[in-house]
Amino acid sequence: MVQLLNHEGEFAPTKEHQVYEDIIRGLRQEDFLKFYRDMARIRRFDNEATALQRQGQLGLWVPAIGQEAAQIGSGHAVGPNDHIFPSYREHGVAITHGVDLIQMIKMFRGVNHGGWNPHETKFHLYAIVLGTHTLHATGYAMGLRFDGKVGTGIPDNDLAVITYFGDGATAEGDISEAFLFAANHKTPQVFFCQNNQWAISSPVESQLPVPIYRRGEGFGIPGIRVDGNDVLACYAVTKKLMDDARAGLGPALIEAFTYRIGAHTTSDDPSKYRDSEEVEYWKRRDPLTRFETFLRKQGIGQDFFDEVEEAGNKLATEVREATFAMPEPELDAMFDYVYSDPHPVIEEQKAWLKGYEESLGGHTSSDQGDTPNYGGTR
Ligand SMILES: Cc1ncc(C[n+]2csc(CCOP(=O)(O)OP(=O)(O)O)c2C)c(N)n1
C-alpha cells in the first residue's frame, strides 16, 4: 500500500515509492495549505448539510466524512480539462473542480433537475445507480482516444478521465464491462475505488475473493492500493496514473483504502450493523487530524487553523441562508427534460397534474391519497 504520511503525521515514504515522493517534493507549501483548507471545508459543509436534512430542509444527505483525503488528494491531481465521472458521495472531488455547493444542496432539496453544468466544471452529474457511470466514463475515454486526444505529447491536447465508485459497486457487472472496454481500447482512464469498507450494511469482506486493487488484472488493468486517509499519497498516486493515462499508457485502477466514519446516508443508522469500537478506531485515523499534525510539524501556526475554522463557519452560514432562500420549482418543471421534443404522453400527464392541482385549490399536497391514472399506455 502506498503511504507517504504515516499515522503520526510524519512524511516517511519508503524507497519503493520514490516516484510518488518526488511528486510531493515538487509541491509548494501553498499546495499543502490548499489541501487542508479543502478537506476542512468539505467536512464543515458535510456537517451543515446533515444538520439541514435533520431539520427537514433536505430530502437526503450523503456524508463523506472520513473520505476527505481520498477525495481532495485525488481531485487536485486531476487536470483542469480532464473529465470526472463521480458516483454520489464525491462532494470533496466536486469542490476541487469548481462545483457550486449551493447547486449540490439544490439537488438534495429536490428543487433542481440534478445538479450543476458538467460542461463548465468537467465534473459530471451524480449517478445513483451503482456502476453505470463507469461505462459513461469509459465511453468518454474511448472518444478521447478516437479523437487523437491521447499520447501526442502536445501541451493541452492530451486528456484523461477518472471515475469514482465504492467497494460495493465493484459487484456490479457494469464495472467489469467498463474494465473490459477500457482495456481493449487502451483508454486514457483511471478507475478510482474508495474502499470505505461498507456498502450500506454489507462489509467489504463479504464480497472480496481478491483485494479490489487486483480486480482489474484479469482484464489487463494494473492496480495499486493507496492509503486513502493520506492526502499526499492519494494526490501522488492519482497524479502519476492520470499523467500515464494522458501519455497513452492505458487505464489503471486505484483502490483508496479508507473508512466511512459517518452513516451511509441520513436514512441509515450504522449502529445497527457495526461496532462502535470499529468506528472509534477509524476516528483515531481521521485524515484531517493526520494532515493537521503534518502541517504543524512543518511550522504552520494556529492562525492558519483559526482562519480555516472561521471560513468554515462562514460557508455554513451561507449554505444555510441560501437553502432557506431557494424558490420552489414550478410544478410542471419535472416534465421538462423527459424528452427533448414534446411528447403526447407527457403532455397528457402535465394536463392531468394541472387539473388535479386545481381540484385541490391550486396547492400541492403529497398526502391526498389518490393514485393518479395518467391514461397513456406507459
Ligand atoms: C444498481 C444498484 N443497486 C443497488 C443500489 C442501492 N444502493 C445504493 S448505495 C448502495 C451501496 C453502495 O456501496 P459502495 O459501492 O461501497 O459505495 P458507498 O455508498 O459506500 O460510497 C446500494 C446497494 C443502487 N443504487 N444501484
Image: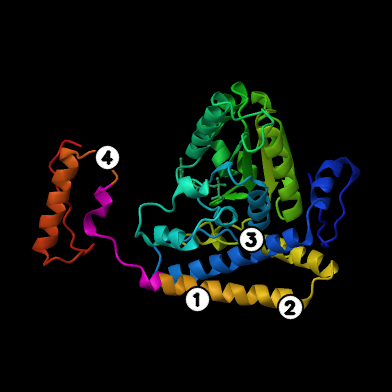
Q: CA distance from mark 3 to mark 1?
A: 34 Å
Q: Are marks 2 and 1 in contact (CB under 8 Å)?
A: no
At which x and y percent is residue 21?
Answer: 84, 47
Image: magenta residue range = 323-336
- Answer with mark 3 or mark 2, whichever residue precedes in sequence: 3
* Front: mark 3 or 1: 1
Q: Residues within 10 Å of mark 4 (few under 14, many from 20)?
A: few
Residue matched to label 1: 317
Residue 325: in magenta span: yes
At which x and y percent is residue 115?
Answer: 42, 53
Q: Is residue 237 left or right of residue 359?
A: right
Q: Secondary structure at mark 3?
A: loop
Q: CA distance from mark 3 to mark 2?
A: 37 Å
Identified at 27% across, 39% down, the residue is 340
Q: CA distance from mark 3 to mark 4?
A: 47 Å
- Answer with mark 4 or mark 2, whichever residue precedes in sequence: 2
- Answer with mark 3 or mark 4, whichever residue precedes in sequence: 3
Q: Residues within 10 Å of mark 2 (few under 14, many from 20)?
A: few
At which x and y percent is residue 338?
Answer: 28, 43
Checking the image for residue 275, the label placed there is 3
Quarter of the picture containing the C terminus is top left
Q: Is residue 337 left or right of residue 68?
A: left
At which x and y percent is residue 256?
Answer: 68, 47
Residue matched to label 2: 303
Checking the image for residue 339, the label placed there is 4
